[in-house]
Amino acid sequence: MSSSPHVHRRARITTLFGVLALSLGACSAEQSQDPTSQEKSAPPSVSIDPDPVRGESAAQDADLDDVHLPVHLTDLVSVDPQWDTPPQVHDGVFLAPGEQDGRLVFSAVAADGTVLWTAERPLSCSGFAMTSAGDRPLAVLTDLTDPGESAKSLGTTTATAYDLHTGEEVWGPVDVPGPHQGPGLVFAERGDEPLGGTGTRVALDAETGERVGGEADVIGEFYGTVVVTDDGDLAASTNGSSGDQWRVPAGDAMAGLDPEALISPATNRLPPGSALIGSTEDGYGLWDLDEGEILEPDLDDAMFDLMTQTWIALRDETLIGLDLGGEELWSADLGDEPQLLSAGGVMTYVLTEGTDLDIYNTVTGNDARVYDPLEEGETAIPLAFTEGAATVVDTGSKLLLVTDQPRAAADYEDQNDPLGGQP
């Protein structure tokens, strides 16, 4: 089924802070030797304590005076976790870094706005990933070892895994060949050219931190599943396994694509058990990693709405809704240069022509109006979601978390009282 032509623009925006933010470093000693690099390093006088610190306290309240939230989020408590890059979310926890006093501080924040733990890193070490060791969700952060006495030695890149909910160390630090590359626990040495490729990609086992994949070409690590190409086959293995979970001829599944050139987007925005695999030029296949089957071929991007259990896919200038098995539910024509921003909370947010924000219902594909047209301020665009109501929004100048907790009645009274309750 196809939706009616899209004729209403929801909002016109000037920038996306989280999507277009200046990339921080990826924690590589080699980067400081690159004169063209824009990455930052912590001053020598700044001390870094890498061990996570338990929080269990609420993040600071967000200032919403100049923020235009979607209407369905206005009755929920909003907090400002001080993130500088868009967070990843897994098992109901958001994680992202933010610069504080010359150091990078990672904050793991629950759906109710509670800061579960924080961990410090040098400003050049923004590389991180979320994964799963069996049923245990993990956060993996990078760091640099002490360079030692040699002035030419800049230290070695390491990776350490922590329990996502508690910050407890699970394994590591383990040496990795270079910066975090993704998706998941994939690392590689930086190439010779500043903007060139990388060295051999290495994947880590989420349970142990050990290197896996052997001599095969690593595509990515996806919540405990490592996918590689090996002798023309596409193969997947799970945590701690010595054999393949499945193996299929890559040419049969993705005709016309070079098996040795298959990739996955560096930032995985899909739930466990799924992945986009293909190429930026020829498109990606949406894969079911549990069964080793392709659900939908030739896509530019895809996301999943946890609340409605619906796939949202982008192909050329068409938005597509798919059920769990990959059957098409609806399609909608888009404007030029579409960019799939997010899908969650029954809504899909798409940017077209660089500044036009279009919104669709993920179940029906119909146009959706989620902003009060009489309100003013920075348009807050949802970027990440839990299965419930918690949502990270990008206002263009900051990243805020709208929690799953309702606002107190007093908050509404103060908001609607121009005198703030004063006589």
Image: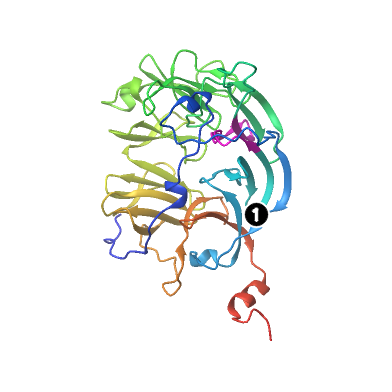
Please identify the quarter of the rendering in which residue 135 is found.
Answer: top right
Is 311 placed left or right of 209 in the picture?
left
Residue occupying the point 51% across, 67% down: 66
- The stretch of residues the image draws in magenta is 120-142
Whether residue 226 appears in this view of the structure is: no
Find the residue positioned furthest to the bottom: 423
Quadrant position of the N terminus in the picture: bottom left
Residue occupying the point 60% across, 15% down: 150
Residue occupying the point 36% across, 58% down: 357
Is 194 placed left or right of 2 in the picture?
right
User: Against 104, is 235 above or below?
Assistant: above
Mark 1 surroundings within 10 Å by alpha-carbon count, few (fewer than 14), some (14 through 19), many (20 or more): many
Q: Position of residue 147 (x, y in %)?
A: 62, 20
Amino acid type indicated by mark 1: Gly
Element at label 1: loop
**Circle 1 sits on which residue?**
113
Residue occupying the point 52% across, 26% down: 28
Please identify the quarter of the rendering in which residue 104 is found.
Answer: top right
215 or 125, which is in the foreground? 125
Residue 131 on the magenta segment? yes
User: Against 288, is 115 above or below?
Assistant: below
Q: Position of residue 161 (x, y in %)?
A: 64, 30
